Amino acid sequence: MSIPQTGGGPIEHRDQLADYLESGCKPKDDWRIGTEHEKFGYCLDTHKPLPYEGDRSVHAMLSGLSTRYDWAPVREQGKLIGLTKGAANISLEPGGALELSGAPLETIHQTCDEVNTHLAQVKAIAGEIGVGFIGLGAAPNWLEDEVSLMPKGRYALMDRYMNKVGTTGTWMMRRTCTVQVNLDFGSEDDMVQKFRVALALQPVATALFANSPFWEGEVNGWQSWRARIWRDLDKARTGMLPFVFEDGMGFDRYVDYALDVPMYFVYRDGKYIDALGMSFRDFLKGELPALPGEVPTMSDWADHLTTTFPEARIKKYMEMRGADAGPWRRLCALPAFWVGLLYDQGALDAAWDLCKDWTEQERAALHHDAAKYGLKAEIRGETMQDLARRCIDIANDGLVARARSGAGGLIPDETHFLDALRDIVTRGQTPSDELLAQYHGPWNGDVDKVFDEYSY
């Protein structure tokens, strides 16, 4: 989850909202890659989730990372709730999952090095205090009352609101994890094309990275239970955004959408003020019940944009949000997939050709079926397995065209980061299929075995 924004003067006219988004446009040479990934922490002996405080806890992890690896502490109301170093930060998901929000980097080689360094540091601290970490889309056997809510004001507000607008919001907060990649755009037209491809093909990423077939100790019947949970969270702020594919899409149209998303909070003087269900449109007029007579600042707008949760979203950059968390070796595959598709114009055009005539109903059906059936989903008679193979081929061409070398020039490009995905489509087995084969085979129906065999 995002940290609160600061700075920015009062918003005096509506055009500033679109201007804020447009200010993210960058020349191609300045496009960067930001990778974010979450993982569940647990006690090694019990496989139970970490509490916030104690010898084996979230607090102990953050303290250890801060002390040994020079991460600066981030506190809220005196509580340690994150770390920062340079342009990267480590934050807490509502249920205590640890998230690295990586720095904006030039190549996938660099972002993968960053991921590897982070996980090595986490593993070192965790091993000393009897803690383990695992990458899954959903907690396999934890119950909701076993998972502590972290001491962040934003989360307390969200927790109160979730069951008023959906049925699975508190599940998402406490017991799901994702990996995502953040990418840049060059202009409004470039943003629109990338946004359309990102949304239409997000189900391909959901299928390739599907890694949550268990829930509360049982097989749940879905390839990505995390994606299933998001379907019934809050329809006002989730989903596939049909308007993005309509004529007239641009920054201003996204502003209209975001203004219609009910608010969660306003952040003032280190505290979150309850604005649950209120309207940012009223805030612009100085009529917000939580702060009567006050108009928002640009940092309030930046905060509000973090409370929209569609499958892809824009702020000053674009976020791909459709993938389950997974094992170490697959974390670098997601940026490779999306950078390959979106950062070379030839690849972007080819990706758009794949999906540009899909209807709203077809996109919605694929969104559902990818989560339910994984590589066995279909669209227009084509299996997801074959569609994914075509997407990977396009991404490969895009990475070849980028020609960003690694290892001092010994590795000519970034295409090898797609190998994990090629393996999935070649075998026709998602990560969830792999887990289910273990569950029905050597694990003899014991979901708890996942911790012993799939942890970092």
Image: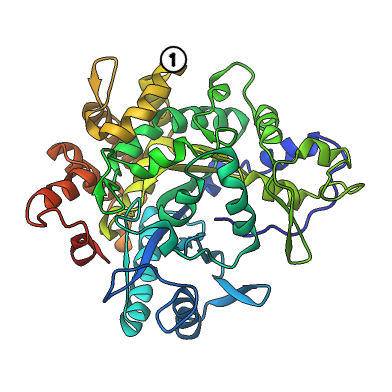
The residue lying toward the viewer, choosing from 218 and 300, is: 218
Q: Position of residue 353 (x, y in %)?
A: 38, 20
Quarter occupied by the N terminus: bottom right
The quadrant where residue 372 appears: top left
Q: Position of residue 305 (x, y in %)?
A: 65, 44
The quadrant where residue 355 appears: top left
| Residue 414 horizontal side relative to residue 317, left or right | left
Q: Position of residue 38 (x, y in %)?
A: 42, 58
Quarter occupied by the C terminus: bottom left
* Residues packed near mark 1 inside 10 Å, few (<14), some (14 to 19) or many (20 plus): few
Q: Secondary structure at mark 1?
A: loop
The residue lying toward the viewer, choosing from 336 and 421, is: 421
Residue shown at the point (41%, 52%) measured from the top left:
176
Instruction: List the residue tagged with mark 1.
Output: 359
* Whether residue 185 can be seen here: no
Q: Is residue 35 above or below residue 422?
A: below
The residue lying toward the viewer, choosing from 93 and 32, is: 93
Residue shown at the point (61%, 52%) measured from the top left:
160
Q: Position of residue 419 (x, y in %)?
A: 22, 47
Disc 1 residue type (three-letter)? Thr
| Residue 340 horizontal side relative to residue 153, left or right | left
Q: Is residue 59 above or below residue 347?
A: below
